[in-house]
Structure formats: structure tokens, C-alpha cells
Image (cartoon, rainbow, N blue to C red):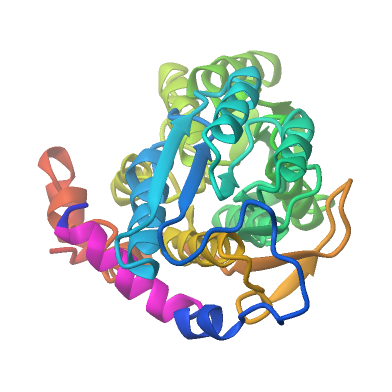
Amino acid sequence: MNTRMRRAAVAVAAGAMAVSLAACGSAKEAGGEKKPSGAAAGDAIKVGLLLPENQTARYEKFDKPLIEKKIADLTGGKAEVVYANAKQDATTQNSQVDTMITNKVNVLIIDAVDAKAIAGSVKKAKEAGIPVVAYDRLAEGPIDAYTSFDNEEVGKVQGKALLEALGDKAKDGQIVMMNGSVTDPNAALFKKGAHSVLDGKVTIGKEYDTKEWKPENANTNMAGALSALGKDKVIGVYSANDGMAGGIITALKAAGLSPLPPVTGQDAELAGVQRIVAGEQFMSVYKPYAPEASAAAEMAVALAKGEKIDGIINQNVDSPTTKGVPSVLVPVTSLTKANIKDTVIKDGVYTADEICADKYAAACATLGLK
């Protein structure tokens, strides 16, 4: 991990979430309670890490290295992290779980491609005595812990930002809603939160559930919406994430819209932040990945050792199959031109030089980013 990522992992985690190694270490299991059969002695644990895809920049650039670093910190570098990325294929991910079970990992961290499809594999892991931490998406099945962001609040933040951008023009046309994949339970929560803010305040001309979150699918959907509604009738676009926002904005430009209508996003991807600087995208949702990764690592290490996680969690969450899942939910921030310096730059996610490279230099200078 480079210096910048180490700085992000330490600074953001320390400032954004009150979970600590002390809480983990003090939560030793009471003498009479049975540890999971896969529980390891000491720090020499084996952690299986399964991430869902590499279309979104965050997983390989942020989540993976942050989780690996936190696990190393918690175990004095003695733990082994076995990693696999499913590349958006639920069948592949189920096979990866089987491999992890065969390799006798002590705990699994799973960010599910398909929350329902993973349930059987979660059950297999549990039957093998391997605790499972659901990461970022609430996987179904008998999971032991979960960490993510307040995903309904994400949708509310996006909806409020879009209304702010539209102002008095909110009733002058129609918006398009570009939701995420139906296989991702978070997408349903983003959608629910956004609708709770937008319904009755704007007219939703077209709404899509975007297959696999792919920007090219969002681009195709947006082109279809413009054709159906008329490009001059579209006053704004709710996009559930930054990757899709990029595809949407390409479609808006191709249709000749100028100025561009406000477009939302999520994940504070570098390309999304640069589009915000350039005035092409109105906002993104900044989700500090370090505290989410830190929570997953702390829970996984504790569970692998057969320790309790009561001192780590901040609430309990129900999945469709499991009630009262011990959870850590991390707050989010609306990212606009006004707070780039105080969020992603301050937290060390990106440097001003990275954001302001090449064609973005002049816009950055106007915003005072340097």
C-alpha cells in the first residue's frame, strides 16, 4: 500500500468510527462458551476476503488494501488474507466460497455479488465452522456480522442534493432515475431513500434498474430515456453511483444538452470528483471506506479467534433470513464542489494534484484546490 493509502486508512478510521483494538481484545469469550470449530489460536489466522466486482474502482483501490492493512495491524502481520474477486459473477463467487472452505480459512469476509444467491454458500461455511462477515452488502444466510453504510440515507442524501440543484425548476420538466442492479440489496435501499425524498417533488419520467451497475448499460438506458421523453424535457438525473453517472453524462453530451442537467452519484471515484470539479456532475456520496474496512477487519479477526464482537458493533440489522445481525453502519457525506477540500483531500483519499491533473487544472484553480 502506498503512503497516501496508509494515511487514509489511519486518519479516516481514527476520525470516523469509534471501534478499537482494545474493544476487540477485551471481548474475550467467557470460559464456558464454545468457540467456532474454525477458531484459530493466536494471531496466525487465515481470512478469506471475497469482493464482488472490479467495474467499480473502489474495491481494488480502497477496500482490499484497507482491509488487508487493518488485519495485518491487528495481528502483528501474522494473519494470512486469501483474496478473490468474483468479477460480477454470482456462480463464480459461490465456487470461491467452496475453495475457501476447502482451504480451511478461519473466517470469511464476503461482499456478495447477489445477496440471495450467496445464502447457500454462507450456510456451507457456517456448517464448516467458519464465521461469515457480510461486507458492504447484506448477504442472506446465517451471517455472523455485517458492516456497511446507512444505505437508505445514501439515497436520501442523493435525492436532497438533486432537489437542491433543481431549485425552482423542479416542476419544469422530468427527471430520470438510474438505480443500481436488482441483485444488490443496497440498490433497493438507495432507491427507497431517494424516492422518499423525490416523490411528489418532481416528475419521474423514466426509471431503470441498471444491470450489473455497468456504465454502458446506464448509457444505453439514458439514451433511450432522452429519445422517449425528449431531451429538452429532462431537467435532472438521479444516478445511484459515479460509474453510471459517467455513462449517463456521455449520453447527455451525445444528445447535445448544454448546459448539462444536474446528475447525482456515489462512491467519490476520482473520475466522479473530477466531473464535479468540471461542473458536469453535481454531486457524489462520499463514503469513507477506511472505517468500513476497519470494522470488517476487527469483526473478522475477533470471530476467527472465537471472541465476542459486542464492543465493536453499533446496532443490529435484520436481513430477509437472519434477525438481529450485529452490525457497524458508517455515516456518509454529500460531496459537492464546496467540500472537496474538506473531505477526500483532507482524508488523504486523493491529492489535489491527482484531482487537478491536465484539463481539470483551470477548474480546480477557480475552486481554490491546490
Q: Does residue 339 lie above or below 69 as drawn?
A: below
Counting from the top left corner in percent of width and height, residue 92 is at 58, 19
Counting from the top left corner in percent of width and height, residue 211 is at 64, 21
What secondary structure do most residues of the magenta stretch adopt? helix
Counting from the top left corner in percent of width and height, residue 145 is at 69, 59
On the picture, is 70 further left or further right than 264? left
Quadrant assignment for the C terminus = bottom left
| Of residues 5 and 263, the one drawn nearer to the viewer in this rendering | 5
Query: What is the span of residues highlighted in magenta in the rendered image?
Result: 3-17
| Of residues 342 and 163, the one drawn nearer to the viewer in this rendering | 342
Q: Residue at position x 48%, y 85% from top?
A: 22
Count of number-bearing discs: 0
On the picture, is 293 further left or further right than 198? left
Q: Residue at position x 24%, y 63% from top?
A: 6
Magenta residue check for 97: no
Q: Residue at position x 15%, y 39% from top?
A: 359
Splitting the image into 4 quarters, where does residue 207 fall? top right
